[in-house]
Amino acid sequence: MTQSAAEPLSAPRPLPGQVRTLVVGAGFAGLGMAIKLQESADTDFLVIDKGEEVGGTWRDNTYPGAACDVPSQLYSYSFALNPDWSQTYSPQPEIQQYIRNVADRAGVLDRFAFGTAAEDARWDEDTRRWRVTTSRGPVEAEVLVLAAGALSEPKLPDIEGIEGFQGAVFHSAQWDHDYDLSGKRVAVIGTGASAIQIVPELAKVAAHLDVYQRTAPWVMPRMQRPYTRVEKAIFRHVPGAQRLQRTAIYWLMEGMVGPPLHHNPRFGFHLARLCRANISRAIKDPELKAKVTPHFTVGCKRILFSNDWYPALARPDVDLVTDPIAKVTAHGIVTADGTERDIDALVIATGFHTTDLPIAEHVAGRDGVTLAGYFDTHGMQAYKGATVSGFPNMFFIVGPNTGLGHSSMVFMIEAQIAYIMDALRTMEEHGWATVEPKPDAQRAWNDDLQTRMRRTVWTTGGCSSWYLDKHGRNTTLWPRTTFKFRDLLKSFDPEQYVVTATEPANEEERVA
Ligand code: N01
């Protein structure tokens, strides 16, 4: 089973009562923010995280088979390339260790408070501060950075009887490593990115595995191979070699499975052929072949990458169940056709809350409106995925419409950090106490995004996915090139913001 090899961090220190910048979340986003703050000599910050370690999603997702489905070379900070990746797609423990090594090397961990959950954050207009209640006491901050991630709150399926199941239950992001699944009858619900990594591993140890599929995904072969010693030596010692490979992979992803496909679904024809060949290589049974063949346009849901998903489904001790689940009983699952399949353990790989960010419930801006309430009225949206009107001095990393299905989120995270850093610098230079996007700027940004969305495969591809909210609007993904995103966020744009001067009395200095 996979688990972080990092040494545990020291006991929690008392929280400072006040900081200039409070960052919520210690994954790639929160750690990257901390490093950039420290580099700019702005050390008046605190990063809090409910977990006990850096890593975020890579700390939490320790399920068997957990690995990156974006090439390793892209899955690192641009300022901390890792010449030691063991494989073209790295397993979770290596990514977690990489994140921990970067944190150790940067020397920022003394400003992290682990085991500290943000319970409530409220903007106080009188003091122009965020008053944050954490599980370990209050903290006041001038600036609040929400870096809690989009894939942090497991989403449990709403299936009748599931609470009454008497066996072991695991969500993919909350794996119980003390429970041995060897020789057990196991069911996996879901066939998304997590399930296709879990199933091949469980199939090796379980007595029998039932995989419950609602929608067959498109699965491409994965160019998985170990890096040789020579390659690693070249990455380490030949200046520019690793960056060159990283750049080549970046353009391949951008050109092959990125915007050309998103905006021109016919471009997916060749990808669909590759996926069908992936099926044919492993599955000979026509009935199973038909079950695993998707019925929507490739790219509408996230394209998955695996060489062992179809071989696992073809095993005699694995059943792919496509009849809808009717209910869960104390000892099994009943499908709509009335069949009950007994199991000892149930693995729930049904994803995360993405279009209803749970942290939004706990953040209240000016006038006491919560982000959740604001999103309910306006749809989940932000200006440049980073700031929200009515929520002064609050910044998102991995905010609305900044997600990717085709390339590395670390790239997007770094672009957002650069934007926030420039905002903080600009505020300091001009002596501004608060910044908040103008409603018109935010509206124009989102109108443009949603206009672009109409023509994408995510909207027209004939699938339903977690990319879309309950109104069918895509509030999660970025619809343009990733380099355009970086370009648009390379510097803070105060003309799109309402700003106030440092002195609360000078309210007339509010800049329109
Ligand atoms: O979740 P998902 P995930 N009854 O939402 C099914 C990232 N990630 O955890 O397609 C039965 O993609 C649902 O069916 P359907 C990555 O961004 C990254 O797998 O809605 N089934 C689907 O099959 C990814 O996109 C890596 O019809 C139900 C599955 O559950 C994101 O995490 C690795 C159901 C959910 O798939 C989430 O992936 C792993 C129900 N009631 C994950 N409800 C990397 O390597 C849902 N389903 C970087």
Image (tube, rainbow, N blue to C red):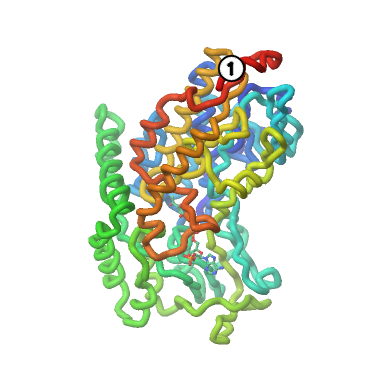
- Residue shown at 46%/25% (left/top)? 492
> x, y (%) of residue 110?
61, 26
Amino acid residing under circle 1? Trp
Most extreme residue toward the right is 137
- Residue shown at 54%/86% (left/top)? 337
138 up-or-down from 212: above or below: above
Label 1 environment density (alpha carbons within 10 Å; few <14, some 14–19, many ≥20): some
Most extreme residue toward the bottom is 338
- Residue shown at 70%/72% (left/top)? 164
Residue 287 as seen in the image, left or right of residue 470? left
Examine the rendering and report whether any part of residue 123 can be seen.
Answer: yes
Examine the rendering and report whether any part of residue 111 can be seen.
Answer: no
> x, y (%) of residue 394?
59, 31
Q: Nearer the viewer, residue 177 or 440?
A: 440
- Is the residue at mark 1 in contact range of ligand 1, meaning its CB lies under 8 Å from it? no
> x, y (%) of residue 181?
56, 67
The C terminus lies in which quarter of the figure? top right
Q: Exactly how many numbered labels are in the figure? A: 1
Query: Residue 507 appears in which quarter of the rendering?
Result: top right
> x, y (%) of residue 299?
35, 58
Residue under circle 1?
432
Q: Nearer the viewer, residue 22 or 331?
A: 22
Query: Residue 200 appears in which quarter of the rendering?
Result: bottom left
463 up-or-down from 358: above or below: below
Q: Nearer the viewer, residue 264 or 510?
A: 510
Q: Nearer the viewer, residue 52 or 374?
A: 374
Residue 62 as seen in the image, left or right of residue 49? left
The secondary structure type at the circle numbered 1 is: strand
Query: Residue 449 appears in which quarter of the rendering?
Result: top left
Residue 472 as seen in the image, left or right of residue 389? left
